[in-house]
């Protein structure tokens, strides 16, 4: 059984569930009012997430929200590269680069990033080759269509879990054909990416069905709109709903949870893991 995934020079322990902290480095999230991302502010937030128990920091410079503007390669590099370089140097954590662009993957890994997180599952031009050359693990995520700006227009599935599983199986094959061993891959059903509320709920309910793909599962539910819809909560009021889904995802076999609220999510997944591994053999009497 797989226990450790080597992410550049840093090991990722998968014997217990791990939390990936979200670090957005778009100018609206980390600007001083200008066009540039503040590396200092990003480092402070990353340091807090590491102290709270994050095993991975996911650095993203492209907004994938529906309606968000496209970002050029140069702009994404300008946002992401200084932050990746600084966190790798300053903190004992795996840095993940959230990008679909081949040049951003290559540069981030050259600067020490240990994981590529691609919501487009290496479907952009050059991405398969860039990831193959980079040599680090890759998270392949399912998204209906290939653009977050249009993915919610008409999501349709014969069976949402079967369709996502088939998509991921095909992307694993494309990776292997490009020289990326399956042993380097993490898989993500893409909660919220081109899915209606019920599709998202079924992904959690039936998450264990993705385990047949034979790779560790990563999932991101934190603050997403399905929680807002079910609970009628604004984004800043979605922590309890996010923790409920993170806990269920762990119980159903997810090994990495992508989250904004790292401390609370670490407690939830640790508690879930303790229940999963409890054994009456450990009782004395
Ligand atoms: C509030 C805050 C509401 C954030 C929605 C959001 C995933 C991901 C994203 C995911 C993987 C997001 C980059 C969307 N989601 N990568 N990225 N899996 N692997 N929306 O689910 O957080 S961005």
Image (spheres, rainbow, N blue to C red):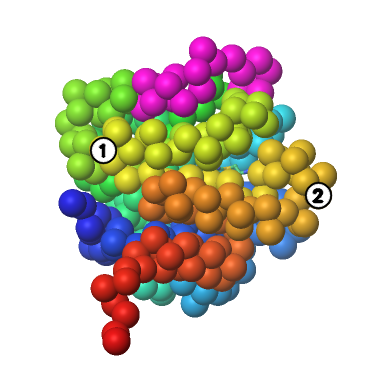
Helix, strand or loop at label 2? It is loop
Q: Which residue is mark 1?
A: 214
Q: How many marks?
A: 2
Residue 243 in picture, x, y percent from top left: 61, 57
- Closer to the camera, 156 or 114? 156
The residue pinned by badge 2 equals 234
Q: Does the image show residue 136?
A: yes
- The magenta segment is 150-168
Instruction: Name the front one of labels 1 and 2.
Output: 1
Q: Earlier in the sequence, mark 1 or mark 2?
A: 1
The residue nearer to you, when weighing 171 against 226, is 226
Q: Closest to the observer: 252 or 232? A: 252
Q: Quadrant of residue 13?
A: bottom left
**Ligand 1 within 8 Å, label 2 CB:** no
User: Is disc 1 in contact with disc 2, using a CB cutoff of under 8 Å?
Assistant: no
- Residue 27's place in the image compared with 167, above or below, is below
In magenta segment, residue 161: yes
Q: Residue at x 49, y 48 (%)?
A: 249
Q: Is residue 2 magenta?
A: no
The image quadrant of residue 129 is top left
Residue at coordinates 76% horizontally, 56% vertically from top-left? 236
Q: Residues within 10 Å of mark 1 (few under 14, many from 20)?
A: few
Quick check: can you spot residue 88?
Answer: no
Q: Position of residue 180 (x, y in %)?
A: 21, 35
Residue at the spot 37% in from the left edge and 34% down from the top edge: 210
């Amino acid at each position: 059984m797989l226990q450790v995934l080597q992410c550049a020079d840093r090991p990722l322990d998968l014997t217990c569930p791990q939390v990936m902290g979200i670090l957005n480095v778009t100018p609206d999230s980390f600007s001083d009012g200008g066009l540039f991302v503040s590396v200092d502010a990003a480092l402070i937030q990353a340091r807090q997430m590491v102290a709270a128990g994050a095993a991975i920091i996911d650095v993203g410079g492209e907004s994938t929200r529906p309606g968000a503007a496209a970002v050029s390669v140069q702009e994404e590099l300008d946002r992401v590269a200084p932050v990746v370089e600084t966190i790798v140097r300053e903190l004992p954590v795996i840095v993940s680069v959230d990008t679909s662009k081949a040049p951003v993957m290559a540069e981030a890994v050259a600067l020490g990033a240990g994981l590529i997180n691609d919501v487009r599952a290496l479907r952009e031009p050059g991405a398969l080759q860039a990831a193959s050359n980079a040599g680090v693990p890759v998270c392949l995520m399912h998204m209906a269509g290939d653009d977050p700006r249009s993915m919610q227009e008409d999501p349709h599935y014969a069976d949402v879990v079967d369709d996502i599983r088939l998509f991921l199986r095909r992307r694993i094959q494309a990776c292997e054909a490009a020289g990326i061993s399956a042993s380097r891959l993490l898989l993500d059903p893409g909660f919220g990416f081109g899915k209606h509320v019920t599709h998202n709920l079924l992904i959690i309910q039936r998450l264990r069905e993705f385990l047949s793909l034979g790779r560790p599962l990563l999932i991101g539910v934190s603050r997403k709109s399905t929680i807002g819809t079910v609970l009628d909560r604004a984004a800043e009021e979605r922590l309890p709903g996010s923790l409920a889904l993170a806990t269920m995802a762990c119980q159903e076999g997810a090994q990495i949870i992508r989250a904004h609220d790292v401390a609370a999510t670490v407690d939830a997944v640790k508690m879930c893991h303790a229940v999963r591994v409890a054994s009456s053999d450990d009782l004395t009497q």
